[in-house]
Amino acid sequence: MQGGGVEQPMQMVLRMKHPSSLGSSVAGDEEEGEGSSRSALSVFKAKEEQIERRKMEVREKVFAHLGRVEEESKRLAFIRQELEGMADPTRKEVESIRKRIDTVNRQLKPLSKSCIKKEKEYKEVLEAYNEKSKEKALLVNRLIELVSESERMRMKKLEELNKTVDSLY
């Protein structure tokens, strides 16, 4: 099917090239038809070979280009790796310190809560202490007043008794 389809257009091309073949007899047409089909076939084969050569050239260029691309890709990967190494030479130490900071921070949270709780307890105890101290001061003052009044009254009584004793003699 493919050969017959290609031969017809080629025969037409050959007939156009050789206008004398249009007016020849049937026997001459057959001979010329075979010759023109052979030349059309050889032209077709030549074109096919030219297409194959061109295809091979393109394929070689593509593979060469792919090879260069792969080499450049490897070079870029190496350069990227070098840049990453140069970018932060202390990265491991920084990561280690950050991890330690996170650990200490986690330890600080419960300590902070405990400190706040103890500060609150301290304030409550301090307030209770201050209240008791005030109460004690008031009681001491009251005691001093009572003792002073008691002494004054006893002195008064003693004086009265002393007067009474003096009046008896």
Image (cartoon, rainbow, N blue to C red):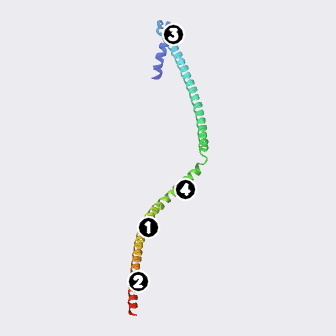
Q: Quadrant of the C terminus?
A: bottom left
User: Between marks 4 and 3, how big is the CA–CA gap?
Assistant: 91 Å
Q: Secondary structure at mark 2?
A: helix
**How many neighbours does mark 2 have within 10 angstroms: few (below 14), some (14-19), or many (20 or more)?**
few
Nearer to us of marks 2 and 1 is 2
What residue is shown with label 4?
A: 100
Decide which of 103, 26 is in the foreground and name it. 103
What residue is shown with label 1?
A: 126
Residue type pointed to by label 1:
Leu
**How many neighbours does mark 3 have within 10 angstroms: few (below 14), some (14-19), or many (20 or more)?**
few
Q: Position of residue 168 (x, y in %)?
A: 38, 93
Residue 104 badge: none
Left or right: 23 in relation to 69: left
Residue 155 badge: 2
Q: Position of residue 110 (x, y in %)?
A: 47, 61
Q: Position of residue 32 (x, y in %)?
A: 51, 11
Q: Residue at x 53, y 15 (%)?
A: 39
Left or right: 116 in relation to 80: left
